Amino acid sequence: MAKGTLQIDLLGTSFAIQSDEKDDYLDAIYNHYKNTIVRVEKTSNLTDPLKIAIIAGILAADEYHKEKMKNRNQDETLDLSEVEKLALKMISRIDQVI
């Protein structure tokens, strides 16, 4: 069962979608995408709605990928610090036994 509905009115087209996501989340994603489209329209000479949508989609994918890589690097750093803590704990236990 769908949790949310989103009315899309962009680049000369209009339609509604249903999603398992809540309306607030859908609105946030939609507003971010609309802002990306406005940015593409302002910074390019494009007038073709399809090309604008494609460029906006690529920019959104770029943002997502960079964020994912940033989080991945943070996760790896956290994993390394956890490994270091475990190694120090094991060394401490070995010292206690010896």
Image: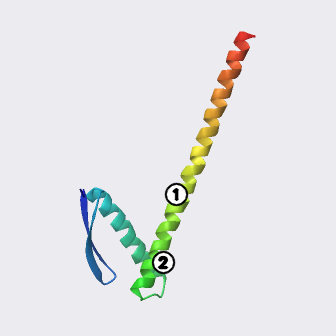
* Res. 14 in view: yes
Secondary structure at badge 2 equals helix
Q: Name above or below for residue 24 compared with residue 58.
A: above
Q: Give the label on residue 57, or none.
A: none
Location of residue 97 (image quadrant): top right
Whole-percent x and y of residue 7?
25, 70
Residue that sits furthest to the front in the current view: 1
Give the CA separation, mark 1 to mark 2.
18 Å
Q: Write the residue at 30% across / 63% down.
A: 27
- Lower position in the chain sequence, tag 1 or tag 2: 2
Location of residue 70 (image quadrant): bottom right
Residue that sits furthest to the right in the current view: 98
Q: Name above or below for residue 41 compared with residue 6.
A: below
Whole-percent x and y of residue 40?
45, 78
Which amino acid type corresponds to the residue marked 2 in the rendered image?
A: Ile
Whole-percent x and y of residue 71?
54, 51
Residue 86 left/right relative to 31:
right
**Label 1: how many Cα within 10 Å (few below 14, some 14–19, many 20+):** few
Residue 13 left/right relative to 58:
left
Q: Give the label on residue 55, or none.
A: 2
Q: Write the residue at 72% across / 16% down.
A: 94
Location of residue 29 (image quadrant): bottom left
Whole-percent x and y of residue 87?
68, 27
Which amino acid type corresponds to the residue marked 1 in the rendered image?
A: Glu
Q: Write the residue at 45% across / 75% down.
A: 56
> For mark 1, what is the residue?
67
Secondary structure at badge 1 equals helix
Rendered-image quadrant of the C terminus? top right
